[in-house]
Image (spheres, grey):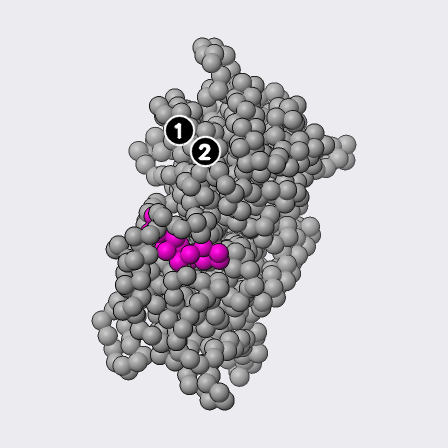
Amino acid sequence: MGSLMPQMHLNVGPASGVANFGIEFLFNLQRLGIDTHAIYVASYVGSQLRLGPTGHHSLLRALHESELHKTASKTLWFGLGQRTPIGLLTSHEACSHFVALTGCLLEIYSPWVTTRIMRAFCEQFVQRAPAGFGLRVPGELSMQKLVEKCGGLVSTTAFPLLAEKFMSFDGESTVGRQTWPKLDSSDHIRSLRKISDPQSIAEALYAMTGLAKREERNIRNITLVGTADGAALAAIGAWLFDLSVTIYNKSDNRRRYSNFDERKQQAQLTAVLAQAHQTRSVAKTETIFPLKNVDDVKARHMMDDPDLEDMISSRISWDIILEKTFQEAFLSLKQSPEIFGTVVGSGARIFSGIANGERGVPMEWTRECTIHFENSYGINYVTFLQRRFPELGYKGFHRSMLNAASIQSFKEATDTFENAVGLLCKKCACKLCSKESGARKHSPYCLAVLTLTVLRFGRPLAGINPIAALYPQRGGLEYLYGIQRQRFCQIVRGNKPMPFFMSVIETEYRFLELSVMQVARCLFSRPIQSPKDDPMRFSSAIDEDGICYYLEILRDPYHNNVVNYARVNVLNGHILYEGRYYRYIDEPVRSHWDIHRREKTEGSMQNISRRAVEDIQRCYGSTPELQLTVRTSNKVLEEFLQVSIALVRGSTVLSHVGPRFVVDSIAHGMGRAACRRDGCKSSADLKKEITKELAKARQQQPVCTINIRGHEVAIVNGDQGSTLMALYGLYNPLVARQECLACCIESGCSIPGWKKFPVILAQPASRNGLVLLK
């Protein structure tokens, strides 16, 4: 059948002949929401790009690595695959060149900025194309849908590291300070690394492609003058087009980099890093391209577009991320290893006391800490930090951290922590800690805040498992520092004295502490300030810029250790449901057909998996069996999984639930509630209400849903069938391991925004299907 499929012939230029796009290919594009004319233009533009031998090899290697990643996705339960759209878009060579260039830009800019660049870039080719080709520039929405599908292709290659290396030659101490949470007008200083006008970037890219093709013999080299954008384009030229590149910094007229022997050849691309005001006087010529700052363009056209306020940064290796991000501040900490190690080690000891429920731990500290991975406290945490950040393997750090983490009493650890943070504040020269003012030059980073950032956000890292060669964004780590700085300022400048440790366990950015997913999202994609009502905050899987984040519970719903359910896996991929891609796993869809009534209904937004919950409840008492299948189409293996659940009683299959590609939302670190089983005086009144509500519940339900003080609470037995139902229909779970049920429910009711949540009993006590209070 596949060989007899009719073909649609699209003439994409004499240089590459005719590209045959089959009907199935175009149909799949339509299901993905990609405009066919946008692919037509992308094919033509891609056919005009000439990758160098090294660039072509890099592209093939990136495609090969994506094949390995999609093989890894076979282990997932709910279908996070990468056969489509990357495999679909790169099945034609011309399209693959376009996708490679777009993927490189997505490692530097946001999807919206990349969309504007690629539209302007395509316009350069459309204006010069023969009239008979019928080309027109795709609309912004059409181009954005195409651009978003190209993300993640080069994320695990050497390109992101090369791009940030080149951009760091600008010498900026902060690259994304404009994205930090605001403190006050005096503290909020924007970074000098700003985005250039997308139109000028596109013109420079077009000139680079001309150099790569060697068509215009009169122009053998070009010069880019601008901020970090010039270095970013130089990285694309060196990595993708094999251009000989030289980078200069205008501030000191020093050459910072060249990838060729100057005695044998000359530079094809010269990038001059200059500040924004220095590029205004540079005139554009055939060989000189000034990258105008976007602020100047906005002022000229009276534009007000917050999307163009985005930062420009890329990835840094784990081996050098602290020094390259925080620069002089981290070098200062290396000169005081005893103090730094004492803060981190004593903090790890305090977290150990909280996790183990030691006597003397303040109740509010226990309530706020919900990360309980085995490597997130105590000696294990110190060891993990040194593995994750090899820079902390410095012998002075290692010894002092281990000594502080081995302190015997909780009170001694707390006193040691407070004293050590105070010493860091005295040593620091930042505006927050320094008592001097006036003409003194202050450090952009606070030593105390930097140390607390490592201590606090290293804990969720203990539950994040990225694939190999996927490194964090420099701007993402800066953003986490900004959040920690805001909380530290509230402690230091507050009217009521509070211990420094409160700055690492409680914050108005509560979701970053509760959700390991959001920390991973900030680090590996790009930091965004999510509003309080953002549904992606509570999602169990997110597709952000071609990087997919999903909880371990989706891969292994029957894990022996329930704490591991909250681990976050990170890989190149997308979320697929019935041929459509979703930004997050609980994204609502509009349904116009009721499959149970077999009739057309009013269009309404429905949750994907509610039907599964109803079916499992109806067949309670049967044994659920998960059945994994791989779907094929026209002899092409589509590498994603779908899940069917067969409900079996004895040897009879009562019903099939599914197939499902996704499940409903599961979020937040599955911590344990504040309960020492000492009589639980604080939850005594709540226990009486729960007892009354449970008495009204149906006896044979695997999940007892009760209403407590305006909250809908589902009490789930810890058996496989009940847990499976919790996966399909519930979110924001609390896991009762050793705590009593009343304390778990009280803890959930105290969290703002939790109007509906389940409590999963890891050690269920039930009789006739009714969960009992212990």
Could you say which is closer to the camera, residue 451 or residue 356? Answer: 356
Quadrant the C terminus occupies: bottom left
Real-space CA distance between mark 2 and mark 1, rounded to the nearest whole angstrom? 8 Å
Q: Amino acid at mark 2?
A: Ser
Residue furthest bottom as drawn: 651
Q: Position of residue 580 (x, y in %)?
A: 42, 66
What is the crowding at mark 1: few (fewer than 14 residues within 10 Å), some, or many (at least 20)?
some
What is the crowding at mark 2: few (fewer than 14 residues within 10 Å), some, or many (at least 20)?
many
Up-down: is 99 above or below 474?
Answer: below
Judged from the image, the secondary structure of the residue bearing numbered disc 2 is helix
Residue 743 within the segment the image draws in magenta? yes
Q: Position of residue 127 (x, y in %)?
A: 44, 50
Which residues make up the magenta segment? 733-750
Residue 340 within the segment the image draws in magenta? no
Residue found 56% across the figure and 19% down from its top: 427
Residue furthest left as drawn: 602
Residue found 64% across the figure and 52% down from its top: 468
Residue found 64% across the figure and 24% down from its top: 336
Could you say which is closer to the camera, residue 489 or residue 104? Answer: 489
Could you say which is closer to the camera, residue 29 or residue 746? Answer: 746
Q: Is residue 78 visible?
A: yes
Q: Which mark is residue 490?
A: 1
Q: Which residue is mark 2?
A: 503
Q: Amino acid at mark 1?
A: Gln
Residue found 45% across the figure and 34% down from its top: 502
Of pointers 2 and 1, the one earlier in the residue sequence: 1
